[in-house]
Image (tube, rainbow, N blue to C red):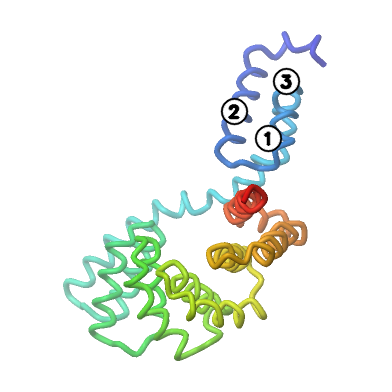
Amino acid sequence: MFGLSHLFYPWGFLVQIFAIVHFVRRRPENYWFYVIFFGGWLGGAVYIVAEVIPDLGLLRGVFQGFGRRSRIQKVETDILDNPSPANYEELGELYKDQGQFEKAQEAFTKAIAARGDSIYTFYSRALCSLGLNDLDGAIPDLERVVTADRKFDYYRAAGLLADAYARTGQLERADPLFAEVTQISTTPETLYNYASFLKTVNRPDEAREWAQKLQAKKRTLPRYMQRRERPWFRKGKTLLKELASA
């Protein structure tokens, strides 16, 4: 294998560099570093086939972003003639998908001012508030959503509300809500947030148990979902290390 490396120079070297850069940015399983580093161009190529190519599906949103920007311009023009709640809601969703949470929040606020009976709009504004780390702004909207529909977004709204309570020091309100949500929802986000809450309230054994459940969850998910939820698994692994050293 290594005797043939001169035939691929410098392309083999570039393949290896590309694989290492992707590894550092995406942080898959650690063993891939050794495959890339010691496997040379072949190890890099194997990594690209196994990890990089499947990740291309996650880039779909990047390409959709070009069309989204033109749609934003169209909706903004439509609003000049027709400032309806539906147009403001669509504009908010477009901005939210672009990660422009402040503009999205403003659009949802205008939609709510015109028609305040859609819990979906309150939920969308809450997600924008969370994106801006405005927990105090998110809590009233999430409370409204959860009061209207306890199961909204497959209990994610309730789970986010529990986490917002916990992160704003309202531990006595977070505890029973987390206990309820985790009976139903086992998403990586919810598992991590609950484990983090348990660590905060000095219940390390339970925190460790739920962080381990998060890592076990990874083994049961399809590969594409493992990639999508990778940030939560990474946070869970860090949490386990913190609990082990405490």
Residue at image location 79% in from the left, 11% down from the top? 4
Q: Which residue is mark 2?
A: 18
Question: Could you tell me how far apart the alpha carbons at marks 2 and 1 are, in whole angstroms?
Answer: 9 Å
Q: Which mark is residue 48?
A: 1
Which amino acid lies under the numbered mark 3 shown in the image of this protein?
A: Gly
The quarter holding residue 33 reads top right
When the figure is inspected, residue 21 is found, relative to residue 215, above or below; the finding is above
Q: Nearer the viewer, residue 165 or 75?
A: 165
* Place of residue 137 in the rendered image (x, y in percent of width and height, measured from the top left): 32, 72
The three-letter amino acid code for the residue at tag 1 is Ile
Residue that numbered label 3 is attached to: 40
Picture residue at 75% right of the left edge, 24% below the top: 42
Vertical order, 25 against 132 (above or below) = above
* In contact (CB < 8 Å): disc 2 and disc 1: yes
Q: Residues within 10 Å of mark 2 (few under 14, many from 20)?
A: some
Q: Is residue 151 left or right of residue 45?
A: left
Sequence order check: which comes first, mark 3 or mark 1?
3
**Dot 3 crowding, Cα within 10 Å, few <14, some 14–19, many 20+:** some
Label 2 element class: helix
Q: Is residue 42 left or right of residue 85?
A: right
Question: Could you tell which of marks 2 and 1 lies nearer the N-terminus?
Answer: 2
